[in-house]
Image: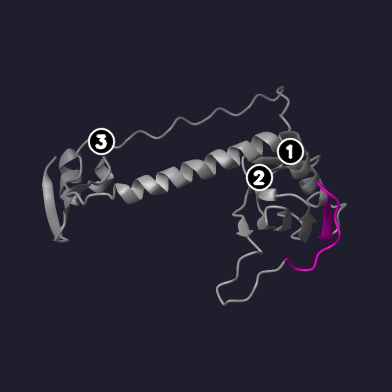
Amino acid sequence: MRVQASTLSDFGTHQIEILLGTASDLPDIPPPPVASPPSADRKPRTFKPRYLLHITMTVYDKQISHLKWQDPVSKEKFEAWCQWDASLVGPMHQIKTSSADYLWSCFPRMIDTTRASRIGRPMAIPEHPALLENQHLITQGDPAQPGGDEIMQCLSAYYLKHQTTLRELRVAQETYNNHARAWRQANPPKPENHTIWLKPHRGSRYLDAAKREGQQ
């Protein structure tokens, strides 16, 4: 690889060198083949629609959870409370309802009410409806809508079916995190020199005009 330009940065403990390589003179990568149209006698396959869904989740004392989300289709906002640690259902990557499938994500906020907040005030669970163990309740939005109570029912069913395994996974993850944190403190990374290559993609469209004319 021929070097066209280079830059060296010295950080005292290590150096980073950036090398700019010349463009490849290989021909362009051929375009992908065009798919043939389906035959007229072939019946089209039907699929349930799939959407991306983000759920905002706050868990208090690992016992009660407050969830918020917005339906991707109707844009209706929902809120729900449940009498269980909803962050445990993190391994469940897909929510399936009668009308749609959701690829969902969440970043749970875990709050311990026995500890004081950053401003020194004691933490407390906000006002919420009375719930029985493992119960959930929609507090905002129409539960009958497709993006409403069906989502909570799906999460609740997964939790009730796998709660023992999910708690074991939580303990194993916390143990691993503690060991990994202790190992990193005892073995801090040592700075090393690095070389970064930057090279334009292959193909004549990345060469200068004179070289392209010469190839023609």
Magenta span of residues: 125-141
- Which structural element holds mark 3? loop
Mark with earlier residue (2, 1)? 2
Viewer-proximal residue among 99 and 11 = 11
Viewer-proximal residue among 162 and 207 = 162
Mark with earlier residue (2, 3)? 3
Number of the label disc, if any, that sits on residue 27: 3
Q: Residue at x 41, y 49 (%)?
A: 181
Which corner quadrant holds the C terminus?
A: top left
Q: Nearer the viewer, mark 3 or mark 1?
A: 1
Q: Report the residue marked by disc 2.
A: 88
Asked if residue 200 lies left or right of residue 99, the reply is left
Q: Quadrant of residue 165?
A: top right
Disc count in the image? Answer: 3
> Is any part of residue 123 visible from this angle?
yes
Q: Residue at x 78, y 57 (%)?
A: 81
- Residue 154, image x, y percentages: 77, 42
- Residue 44, image x, y percentages: 71, 29
- Residue 163, image x, y percentages: 71, 38
